[in-house]
Image (tube, rainbow, N blue to C red):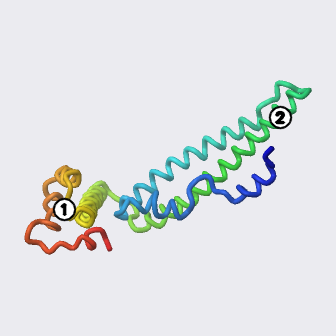
Amino acid sequence: MLDMNEIEKIIKDFEPRHTAFQMDNFIVGKAGHPYFQYRQAQREIADRQQTVLDLRDNLKLAEMQKMRWPFGKRAKIKAAMRARRIEQMRKDLAEYERELARLVEIGRALHENYGELCREEKDQLESEAWRQKAIRMAGIDLLVNGRVNSTTLEFILSLPKADRLRVIENFKPGTKVDPYKMIGL
């Protein structure tokens, strides 16, 4: 039979959710442009906030729940299961609160760059961010394939005409192309 105490020792410092490194670099950081990172941080914060509020309420309900079997072996088993469920809910809540705190820290730092934005400023940043994403995609294609692939070209063609032209300036024939610069290296 498995030794549950040994298992508890092994998983004691296990973070079942995302690490700070993952949140910084892969959840928010991979968005590329700082404005996209800010938007991603906002999405993640909103999701985690809702989850934390729901978990808090569910934990309160679980703690209030009355036992239906006040005696016997069945009652002991049910009580042990309930206690484990409540303990797991507390751990889940702590993990989501840890993630939320880190995401708020990231979001706060990004918010300082932008402050409150009007619609025109948001539209300008959005346009700039999508252009940067298109240039980065093209740079990756050039590094990997030696040419811009059709999916990236379709993506570029989906941009508004003015943005499309600004992106194509980076790799049109006769232009000295630096794919490393295009991807931000």
Quarter of the image holding residue 69?
top right
User: Amino acid under label 1?
Assistant: Arg
* Residue furthest out toward the left: 174
| Residue 9, percent from left and from top | 76, 57
Q: Secondary structure at mark 1?
A: loop
Which is nearer the eye, 50 or 1?
A: 1
Which is nearer the eye, 1 or 112?
A: 1
In the rendering, which numbered label is found on residue 79? 2
Identify which residue is drawn at 20% across, 55% down: 149
How busy is the neighbourhood of tag 2: few (under 14 within 10 Å), some, or many (20 plus)? some
Identify which residue is drawn at 58% across, 59% down: 101
Mark 2 and mark 1 lie on one chain; the one further toward the N terminus is 2
* Residue furthest out toward the right: 72
Is 112 left or right of 64, judged from the image as shown? Answer: left
| Residue 33, percent from left and from top | 34, 63
User: Amino acid under label 2?
Assistant: Ala
Q: Which residue is mark 1?
A: 147
Q: CA distance from mark 2 to mark 1?
A: 64 Å
Is 113 left or right of 63, judged from the image as shown? Answer: left
